[in-house]
Image: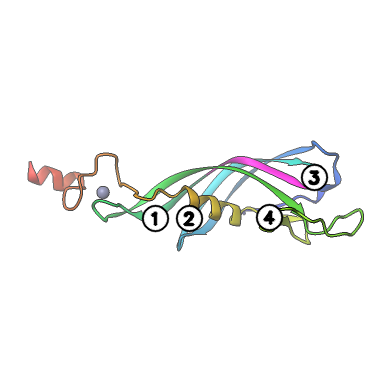
Amino acid sequence: MLQINVSQLLKGPIGSTEDHQMSGTVEIDGNTSQTQGRVSLTRTNRGILVRGTIDTSVEVSCARCLNSFSCPLALDIKEEFYPATDTASGQLPAPEDADAFTVDEHQVIDLAEVVRQYGLTTLPMKPLCREDCTGLQKCSPTANKLTE
Ligand SMILES: [Zn+2]
């Protein structure tokens, strides 16, 4: 599950923290990626700050040999979630960032969208199945042996 209930944390004083171990699947670039990691949530004066490292991998095609392979990604997450409604005043806050992540009406934050966005921006432009990939027909170890 990449959803975390933050109702207790939202009731706590500013500076309260909670650690969460999480795992689940996220759709990244058309692939379903297994995701796991550990995040630390901190109650801020405006919402919940999420920090942590999340490991995932995305199926991509090698830029040289075109073989598809699983590209591991370590995502350094740092995002603030704003409550959709202010529990004290019932007023909607006005986050300066229109694309800000929000805590939903059930006091749950969903990290799947964060992972998806970070995953997309972290994906290499020219992924290589391995550092020394030599390109078409020479990429796999067996193909290399045959040509030697
Ligand atoms: Zn390759």
**Residue position marked by numbered label 2 in the rendering:** 33
Residue at (79% x, 56% y) in the render: 94
Q: Earlier in the sequence, mark 1 or mark 4?
A: 1
Residue at (75% x, 52% y) in the render: 82
Above or below for 98 versus 56 = below
Q: CA distance from mark 4 to mark 2?
A: 21 Å
Residue at (79% x, 46% y) in the render: 46
Tell whether 60 sits left or right of 103: left
Q: CA distance from mark 1 to mark 4?
A: 26 Å
Instruction: State if disc 2 and disc 4 touch (CB < 8 Å).
Output: no
Tell whether 95 sits left or right of 63: right
1 vs 4, front mark: 4
Say what secondary structure mark 3 lies in. helix
Find the magenta span and give its range: 47-54
Q: Is residue 48 magenta?
A: yes
Q: Quadrant of the N terminus?
A: bottom right
Q: Position of residue 120 (x, y in %)?
A: 49, 54
**Residue position marked by numbered label 4 in the rendering:** 101
Q: Earlier in the sequence, mark 2 or mark 1?
A: 2
